[in-house]
Image: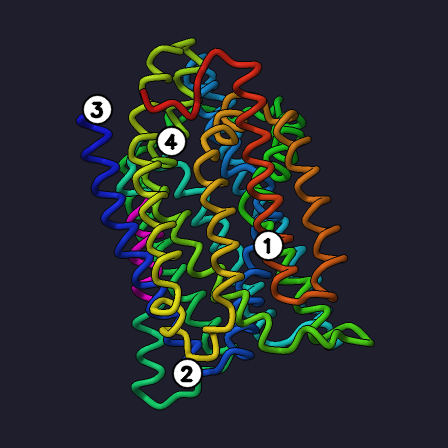
Amino acid sequence: MINLIYTSGLITVLSVISFNIIFFIESYISSQVGVADFGQYKFVIKAIHFISHIMILGQDYALFYYISRYLKQNLLNDLNGYVRWVFRSLMNRSLVLMALSYLCFHYSYIDNSLMIGVIMIPIICVDTILNKYLLFNKAYLFSFAPRAVIQSLSFTLMILGLSFFNTPLTTINIVVCYGASFVCCCSIYLAMISKFPIPRAKPRQTDRLQWINDGFHFTLSTFVITLSRSIIYFFVQYYALWAPAGSLILSDATLGFYGAITTITFAYHLGTKSMESYLKPRITRHLEMNQLDELQMDLKHVNRFRYLIVWSITLIIVMYPEMILLRFGSIYLTIIPDLVLCTICYHIYTICQPALDYMIFGGQQRIVSRILQVKLVAICLLSYLLIPRIGLTGAVIADAIPAALSALAAALWVWRHSPTRVLAII
């Protein structure tokens, strides 16, 4: 309990700092470039992370299972083979991606900003894997601080530097700064990783097909959890700017409005990041060793902090939406109802999220994949039906309603099929 309070307390403080930095710089960018260009910047960043997630092939989460398994069984040859395969296969996929992206750029299918983003995707992928490896080794602060604080702070300083030297805040310049901030973060991870070496042995890759198969399941599961909003961004971008007939409801500002909502509700993710960082490796370890009582105790302690933080975020957003949105610009005051709707749904989603984590990291990837497949279909269907007709409100419904229902479905499944009470606080 003391370890949880100490670790989660420090990471929660860093989360608050991180969110304030992100909120400051994104509202600053919006106020400087306008709602339309802010939306384009958000779209490019979401596209970059969307591709990065596919490129990493679920190994950022699979490593929790495989490293734990190989260490427990003392299969050091398989462990070394797995780690080598993760990085080598990532580099091979990155080379193919860059070649294809260059062809798309050459024939004007993608623009300069997205091409620059593609170049930094391997760095983001390596950064993510190193982050999860440190998390597996219970280096919670080492894992969280660079990504939460150093990356966002360096990005902020670069953007303010551009403004100081009167350099235009174009989408290309912003994306370059974003990529450079990940270089800073990844460099710190590489320096830290030497403290947690993997025992050396001759690499063996006899489980490669299983790595790939489980990687696809992790990719799908975590894709719908972490990147479902990228789908919404695509639909809004398509109907506002690309569709032949377009939509009278949408404009080039709609993407910026939705970007502001996602930035504000990102507070739920950062606010509970400390609990996730603490809990995810423990779920795997406790279940591997059949320590159900210890797992239940950890869940109770974590949920008490989670509920306090989630309710605090919800009350602040619902009570002071005008004050928050004015930081982006007065034009954003028109989206208060959409912000409140998204907030309520993500409140439900974040409260129930431990059930999804329990299923993903507890060996129920196939079942949770089915839940998230339904969520993915719902997002696409609602986006197709609602965004062209009711614009921003349709985007918020397609984003928030499936998120809340999927987390509730996971909580119901765990309640019916597991002795562990994942949402308990007493």
Is any part of residue 106 visible from this angle?
Answer: no
> What residue would you read off at disc 1?
50
* Contact? badges 1 and 3 (CB < 8 Å): no
* Sequence-first disc among 3 and 2: 3
Residue at 29%, 26% in the rendered image: 301
> What residue would you read off at disc 2?
32
State the SS at label 1.
helix
**Front label number (1 vs 3):** 3
Residue 328 higher or lower than 61, as above or below: below
Q: CA distance from mark 2 to mark 1?
A: 26 Å
Task: Tell me where residue 370 appears, x and y as whole percent.
Answer: 68, 31
> What residue would you read off at disc 4?
136
In the image, 380: left or right of 19?
right
**Front label number (4 vs 2):** 2
Residue 139 circle label: none
> What residue would you read off at disc 3?
1
- Residue that lies at the very extreme toward the bottom in this rendered image: 166
State the SS at label 4.
helix
Residue 267 higher or lower than 329, as above or below: above
Type of amino acid at the residue the image marks with label 4? Phe
* Sequence-first disc among 1 and 4: 1
* Contact? badges 3 and 2 (CB < 8 Å): no
Type of amino acid at the residue the image marks with label 1? Phe
The answer to which image quadrant residue 422 occupies is top left
Type of amino acid at the residue the image marks with label 2? Gln
Q: CA distance from mark 3 to mark 4?
A: 19 Å
Q: Looking at the image, which is closer to me, 278 or 167?
A: 278
